[in-house]
Image (cartoon, grey):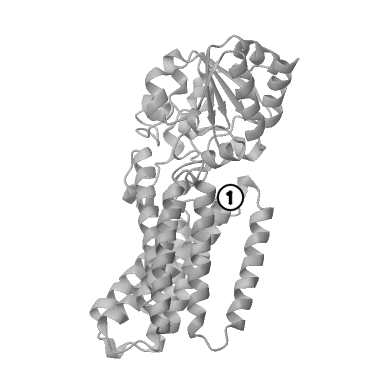
Amino acid sequence: MEISLIQNIVYIFSSILFITGIKMLGKEDTAVKGNFLSAIAMLVAVLVTFINISNPLILLAGIGLGAFIGSLIALKVKMTSIPEMVALFNGFGGLATFLIAWSEFNSTPDNLFQYILVMTTVYVGGITFTGSLVAYAKLSEKIQIAKTSIITKLFTTIFYISLAFLLYSAIVTPLLVINFEFFTVLLVLTLLGGIGFVLPIGGGDMPVVISLLNSLSGIAAAFAGLILLNNVLIVAGSLVGASGLILTIIMAKAMNRSIGNILFVGYASASSSKSSEEQGEVNPINVSDAYLILENASSVLIVPGYGMAVAQAQHVVRELGELLEENGTEVKYGIHPVAGRMPGHMNVLLAEANVSYDVLAEPDDVNPSMDSVDVAVVIGANDVVNPSATEEPGSPIYGMPIIEVHNAKTVFVLKRSMSSGFAGVQNPLFFKQNTRMLFGDAKDSIGGVVSEFKD
């Protein structure tokens, strides 16, 4: 049997494992197995590729080094840093395809389709790489550059120039006149353009951007598979690209905005929002009083946000939920699709704490009956519970679907301070008559309530 035939059979087998693994990711009880199955599929596909290589030791060493670094990162990364890690992994996926296409440029045959494919792969991979680095820097708050700054406008202009240059080089310029110098200009513009692609996008839109960059990394991988005529790379890249794009659309819909608006318009200036001085005073509450109210509640809705991730409070939140249920209280968790800083961020945190998937609910499931909820406990969430989205037409986030906790009978908001959310918009929820602010570290505050229940 020919080596290429053996490889293609194994590639088909790996592709089936990929599809099965992704399907298993859709359920909490099979997600870990699905992830493991997909990893095995990729390992098998990589190993069978070595059959054609005369000296695979260098590549095996590279795999070993990469596995060591990846494992080290995965073991050390905090749950709060998962979005940044995902952004970096997306970026390095784009870099890999960028380098593959670059290496194929000089060996590209006199074939227009293959040439356009190489140029497109270079562009998508390069944009994904540097764009993901910017997303990482924004998520980790290493850079804070205003959308209206000269630097942002400069890089945004370079992005549009790079896009125009790609179209010119791929469509207008005859194939034979493309030389190394011309291609080098495209490489530089592409890498700079990736910065301009993500830099103007606001922090509140980062979950959608992370999902889109994940999709772009998959698309770039599929293009690289076409260049190399590698079936498993085409299938795996297509799966990642399609699933990431679907998730991006779902996330955009959850914000009631188009992808174009998120990427090229963004939130309006927050200056039109009412200031805290215009909205009145807040009503603080202590742990003991919060316990008394929760003890007598018949229904409690817990709404987690990025603040829960920062405080690493998911385990004590689960413990509180269990104590409330033992006390006869109906407990649900309201999960907004863009809560946190990446798609599914809150689901991952609660799954880590072994919170049952059955008690997680989306906004459409809890909003219609919100007025019957005795206590809504908001733990570090901000923008996704901001009533300005429904009550203030002049607000930058007006029209974005939220979890309408302000309609509950009582609202507890756990925050360290009165700071605005990632979108930079003040939250009138803090000043509502039915809202009580429980200031401090969320883990300590919830832990205090748990201690009151146990005592």
Position in image of residue 337 (x %, y %):
44, 38
Residue 169 in view (yes/no) = no
Between residue 313 and residue 123, name the one nearer to us. Answer: 313
Residue 205 in view (yes/no) = yes
Find numbered disc 1 in the image and state the secondary structure of the residue it sits on. Answer: helix
| Residue found at the far top of this picture | 296
For residue 446, above or below residue 33? above
Quadrant of the frame with the C terminus? top right
Between residue 85 and residue 393, name the one nearer to us. Answer: 85
Give the side of residue 69 with respect to residue 44, left or right: right
**Residue drawn at x 50%, y 45% as measured from the top left:** 30
Task: Give the labeled residue for mark 1.
Answer: 82
For residue 437, above or below residue 155? above
User: Of the residues shown, which amino acid type is indicated by label 1?
Assistant: Ile
Q: Quadrant of residue 154?
A: bottom left
For residue 337, above or below residue 285? below
